[in-house]
Amino acid sequence: MQSSVQTKDVSPQPVRRTDSFWIRMVRQRQLILMSFPMVIYVLIFAYVPIWGWLMAFQQYRPGFSILNQKWVGWYQFRFLFEDENFVRVLRNTVAMSLISLVLSFVTAIGLAILLNEIKKTGIKRLIQTISYMPHFLSWVIVTGLVSTALSTEDGIVNVVLMKLHLINEPILWLGEGKYFWGIVGASNVWKEVGWNTIIYLAAIASVDPSLYEAAEIDGAGRYRKIRNVTLPGIKPVIVILLILNIGWMLNGGGFEIQYFLGNGQVVDWSETIDIFVLKYGLKIGNYSLGVAAGIFKTAVSIVLLYAANTIAKRLGEERLI
Amino acid sequence: MGVHARKAAFGLLMLILAISIVASGCSKSGGNEASGEPSASSSSPAASSGGSSDAAKPEPFEISVFMQDPGPIPTDDNRIYKKIKDELGVTLKEEYLVGDAEQKLGVMIAGGDYPDMITANTKLVAAKAVIPLEDLIEQYAPNLKKHYEKVWNQMKDPGDGHIYWLPNYGVYQGEYKTTQYYGPAFFIQKAVLKEFGYPKVRTLDEYFKLIEDYKAKYPEIDGQPTIGFSSLAFDWRDWPLRNAPQHLAGHPNDGGVLVDPNTNVATLYEATDVAKPYYKKLNEENAKGVVDKEAFAQNFDQYLAKIASGRVLGTFDQRWNFQQGEDSLISQGKPERAYVALPLVYDPNTTDYYMDRPVLNLNNGFGITVNAKDPVKIIQFLDTIIQEKWQKLLSWGEEGVDYSVGPNGLYVRTPEQRKQQEDVTWKQANKADALYRFLPKLEGKYPDGNMEGPGNQPDEFFANLKDIDREVLSAYGFKTWTDFFSPPPENRISYPAWSIDLVEGSPAKVANQKLKDLAFKYLPKAILSKPDGFDKVWDEYVQQVGKVDTKAYLDRVNEILKWRQDNWSN
């Protein structure tokens, strides 16, 4: 923040600007030196491997040098985009991402605010711990739990619904495509809500207590304080996280969950880009297709990230870049 | 300074430790090498082609062996090894695997420290650690030559045409016979057969009729609803859903294709009239509530749990796949809920071909390394061992000690002798199981009517069974579980088509994956649809399969079938 204020100050005198840039460089040489390891790390592990994108334009066979391969131009991309399933796969990916994104934001913020209102530290800690425990389970286990709970053979969901007389016979939850997105969203919430809450709780804790006092003196009740103090207080955090998450949009709210819960009967709703690539890329030894899909996802992600960032900027909100 | 000195001392200590470990590892195999040398240098041309024990005084000869297997490690005074030493003069200096095989071989290859004889690994061929055997066998090993004659061309390395390994399983003599069956079949609970007085079941209609009747009579098993027929379509386990039609039509397991045994040409059966009647039948049964609605949405664990609950009356699968669930039934004390495998066919006049003869166990068994001083003697030793007398010693044991000959010439064991065979410590002193596992062996039936081992001898097997099993088999007049099946003919030379490598990333492989995806999507849909909606779903399925590049897939399969026919024939 400070530095940007400084540049604004000096901007009217362009001649001095370069001057000050170099002077500042020298003045901050320790900082710059300290950043070198990180910059080198990013260069080596994030930028150098990009030359592997060459594979996307080849029919890559492992065991041979990357220069000793058959070049196929845009074939892999065409295979990806021209497949009649591609539109469906893309739709599933985006839909499940959106569902997971919205659900996880609403539930995490909601839970954080509720937790914040609990004044007894012991109970608050207990609830928090219990709710973030599932985060440490792997998806293999969680999906196992989910499919057992949803089973038509004494799965708890069907049993409860039957006891409540809401349904007459067990529903085959995992065999009907229309339920699939909802199941994925709900599983995501169950597993991650507690974990996602942590960052909002931290943000709430940093809200200036004097604001609450002032609101109280002005006669604000509990709900009024949530609406007018807490939420505006954590808005910057919400916006930043939203922008970050939008960048991950094409990951479909995870890969494992659709892979483990999906089956032939719901494939029209469950197959995401990653699963498609796994099936027609890695599983059958066409690594180039995986790279092509990776390039596609990266390109879309960058566009989405910038779009979200620009919108946030226009709205005068906190932004990432 | 003090800290530095301590650090240095510690580092030195670690270094010494590391070196000593490496050194001790090296010296061990080096020792093998050295001790093998002197006896090997006495190159006597004792061509014991007959190999019988009456070759006066056999020259002592030592062979060092490495087995990529942890054992069981025989004791020093092992009875079988002693007999080999006394009669053939051969001392086997064995080393067994400790830890990771690939790592051990890596070290071995790096140092060039090979024993004389080693169990197979393709790494060793690539490292040129083993010698070609075909000339040795032709010249010095008439028995081995005879044993492997039929599969000679298959044994050749596809890369350079040499034979490096002597396959340990898959060469049969006489009639092929096993007692247990682990392959594909329609399975039905023993309790169901028992309930209806052990009827003969040949067709799908008879099979499902039994299940329907039993389910109607016992709607609950152990307090939970009875499941008539379950199945599975999960991840790579696709055969419970996809493979049944080829067997119903009387073909062996060729994966996704039917291969005409006369022309050796493959055709697809999925989404054709070969497959339709089966799924149509499942659709009808589903309408009657017999088919498990969850079958195609469940994961493998749920499937196993269902089997283990004892309320699944029938399934189509390969036995090894759900073995865990069945084992659990037995340990729960519910052997009557375990399954009998039935070879159902569409038309009762078709000969069933569910059971097949095992194929040659390529890239397995022993090879001789470049370090062996006298490969001729080693191949002669192996040539002796392949003879009936020695094979029986390795599998059955010694007559009078481990078995006796019954009045009909068949070998039998007394209950005590059978019990001994389950005792691990006894076996270490009296059996050479690990060695036998890797040696070339005679499988099938000996000319005298005995099977290659007690496990496959029908009477011996029958005597070891549980009561319910004996009851089921007796009711049908059978001795073993494989008696339900027609005896398998000789394998087609190009069999099985499922082992064909479709080439990574090729259009054939893409087509294969698409076929699988379509099957997983449409077959459950067709089965679970209302009976009058079946044809609509089926037509859509056929239409979708028509869009797949099946030609690429079939071309590749047929190309390899032809290659095998050309190169594996004699």
Image (cartoon, rainbow, N blue to C red):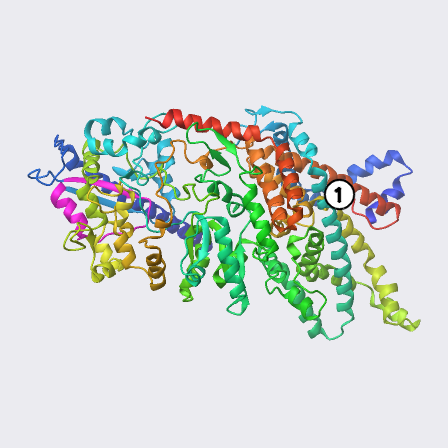
The range drawn in magenta is B61-89
Query: In the image, residue B438 lies at what x, y percent?
Result: 29, 43
The residue lying toward the viewer, choosing from B445 and B417, is B445
- Callout 1: helix, strand or loop? helix
The residue lying toward the viewer, choosing from B392 and A3, is B392
Q: For the C terminus of chain B, which image quadrant? A: top left
Query: In the image, residue A25 lies at what x, y percent?
Result: 75, 40
Q: Residue furthest right?
A: A218
Q: Is residue A320 left or right of residue B484?
A: right
Query: In the image, residue B538 lies at what x, y percent?
Result: 63, 42
Which chain is mark 1 on? Answer: A
Which quadrant of the view contains residue A110? bottom right
Callout 1 amino acid: Arg
Is residue B296 in sight in this rendering? Answer: no
The answer to whether A161 is drawn above or below residue B403 in the figure is below
The residue lying toward the viewer, choosing from A62 and B29, is A62
Q: Is residue B335 left or right of residue A300?
A: left
Which quadrant of the view contains residue A203? bottom right
The verdict on residue B73 being magenta is: yes
Q: Is residue A240 left or right of residue B68?
A: right
Is residue B103 in sight in this rendering? Answer: yes
10 Å crowding of disc 1: few (<14), some (14-19), many (20+): few
Residue beneath disc 1: A27
Kindly identify the residue that appears in the image at 68 percent across and 54 percent down. Answer: A184
Query: In the image, residue A299 lies at what x, y percent?
Result: 73, 37
Kindly identify the residue that appears in the image at 41 percent across and 50 percent down. Answer: B11
The verdict on residue A72 being magenta is: no
Q: Is residue A91 left or right of residue A42?
A: right
